[in-house]
Image (cartoon, rainbow, N blue to C red):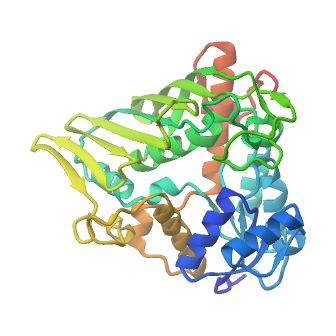
């Protein structure tokens, strides 16, 4: 079946992610044909704020609208599977927020459905679309660091530091059995695997929940303040995690995750060590790449005309004009729509490949492996999860 020229989108979900998708699509010239939320009041308010018409509380109709080419799934995790399957069933291209689902079974169902379809299906891991992340991938591939022996890093946030802070993500029924690993850890894992071209093989995990109870989360938006004080819920998902990792080729890995680390807004950092050099990319200073090799140590600044290969295509502003999180999302969506049209630049595609539903399946297998590792106090491989290892609480 031929692919239509995709210029019209439906956004399902009007929270933080939905609003960011709408802004990014406006920047790349894609029309948002309809905006859908679970309640009419939310849909109307978001549509007015974002300048989108029409709006609806009937997401299923929006996903099947014949005037829609691409469905953006920006709803809570527990709804991903239902919405994506409906969109694929209506023969739409799909761009889905991560993680792919709440558990491995959902991820497998969606990955299989994507494989059977002829539609483009993309998972929203936008960190691989920062120019300096793509630059790091290119430099590692060129051998600038030599043979890799370690990949290490952190992803620290503080938006759940207060016991009064809450969100649907703290509810395992909505977000899944893991929070810190599935929510932010999956971003780091995806970035580490993308820049190194090495997959995580196994994990030894230690998980911790700092606040055992939090306020009820109805209608509390991500990164907002506390709940309404009407009640509290038991929290079973982790606030923080320490992970030892093994990548392919025996490469060592370490990762610290937290959503309760004071003073860290969105502090993702990735370091790669090789036989001939090391490199570090700090997401909160996105235009910098620290590189140390036999020729010396330098901080490489993002600037058009100074980057290598396909990374050059992702740098859109002059040096000194910072490009951040929203710009990386814009790059991801621009790449996804170019893939749908069949005209994506080859060099850019090598530097920043699109994240797939197959990636999402592997990420959730990693999440399950980490949960199993913490429960059984042992190393767990991703493969044993993928082939059906029986884990505590998992059927």
Say which of 209 and 245 sits in front: 209
User: Residue 55, relative to residue 229: is it above or below?
Assistant: below
| Lateral position of residue 12 relative to residue 301, left or right | right
Q: Residue at x 43, y 59 (%)?
A: 324
Name the residue at the top extreme. Answer: 377
Q: Classify residue 374 as left or right of residue 218.
A: left
Q: Nearer the viewer, residue 318 or 204?
A: 318
Image coords of residue 361 (percent x, y)? 67, 46
Q: Percent position (x, y) of residue 55?
A: 81, 76
Residue 259 is at least partly visible in this image = yes
Query: Residue 316 lies in what quarter of the image?
Result: bottom left
Q: Which of 296 and 114 is in front in this view?
A: 296
Residue furthest front in the image: 229
Residue at 22%, 66% in the rendered image: 306
Q: In this rendering, is residue 241 above or below 280? A: above
Residue 97 position, x and y percent, is: 66, 56
- Apparent side of residue 363 relative to residue 104 in the rendered image (left or right): left
Give the position of the N terminus as an image quadrant.
bottom right
Name the one closer to the observer, 173 or 38: 38
Which quadrant of the rendered structure holds the C terminus? Answer: top right
Indicate the quadrant where residue 80 lies: bottom right
Q: Position of residue 146 (x, y in %)?
A: 24, 41
């Amino acid at each position: 079946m031929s692919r239509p020229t995709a210029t019209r989108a439906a956004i399902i979900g009007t929270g933080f992610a939905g609003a960011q998708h709408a802004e990014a699509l406006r920047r790349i010239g894609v029309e948002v044909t309809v905006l859908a939320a679970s309640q009419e009041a939310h849909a109307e308010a978001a549509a007015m704020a974002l300048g989108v018409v029409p709006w609806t509380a009937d997401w299923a109709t929006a996903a099947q609208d014949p005037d829609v080419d691409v469905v953006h799934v920006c709803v809570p995790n527990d709804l991903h599977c239902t919405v994506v399957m409906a969109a694929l069933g209506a023969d739409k291209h799909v761009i889905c927020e991560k993680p792919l689902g709440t558990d491995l079974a959902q991820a497998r169902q969606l990955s299989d459905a994507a494989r059977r379809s002829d539609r483009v299906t993309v998972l929203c891991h936008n960190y691989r679309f920062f120019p300096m992340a793509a630059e790091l991938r290119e430099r590692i591939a060129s051998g600038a660091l030599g043979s890799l022996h370690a990949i290490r890093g952190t992803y620290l946030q503080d938006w759940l530091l207060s016991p009064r802070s809450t969100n649907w993500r703290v509810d395992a029924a909505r977000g899944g059995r893991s929070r810190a690993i599935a929510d932010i850890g999956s971003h780091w894992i995806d970035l580490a695997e993308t820049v190194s071209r090495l997959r995580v093989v196994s994990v030894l995990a230690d998980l911790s929940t700092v606040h055992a109870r939090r306020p009820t989360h109805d209608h509390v938006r991500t990164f907002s303040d506390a709940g309404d004080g009407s009640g509290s819920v038991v929290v079973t998902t982790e606030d923080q995690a320490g992970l030892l990792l093994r990548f392919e080729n025996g490469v060592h890995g370490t990762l610290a995750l937290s959503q309760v680390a004071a003073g860290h807004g969105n502090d993702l950092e990735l370091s790669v060590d090789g036989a001939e050099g090391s490199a570090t990319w700090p997401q909160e200073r996105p235009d910098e790449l620290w590189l140390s090799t036999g020729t010396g140590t330098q901080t490489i600044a993002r600037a058009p005309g100074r980057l290598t290969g396909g990374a050059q295509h992702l740098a859109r502003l002059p040096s000194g004009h910072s490009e951040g999180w929203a710009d990386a999302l814009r790059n991801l969506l621009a790449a996804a729509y170019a893939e749908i049209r069949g005209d994506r630049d080859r060099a850019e595609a090598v530097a920043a490949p699109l994240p797939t539903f197959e990636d999402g399946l592997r990420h959730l297998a990693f999440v399950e492996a980490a949960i199993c590792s913490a429960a059984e106090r042992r190393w767990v491989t991703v493969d044993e999860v993928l082939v059906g290892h029986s884990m505590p609480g998992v059927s």
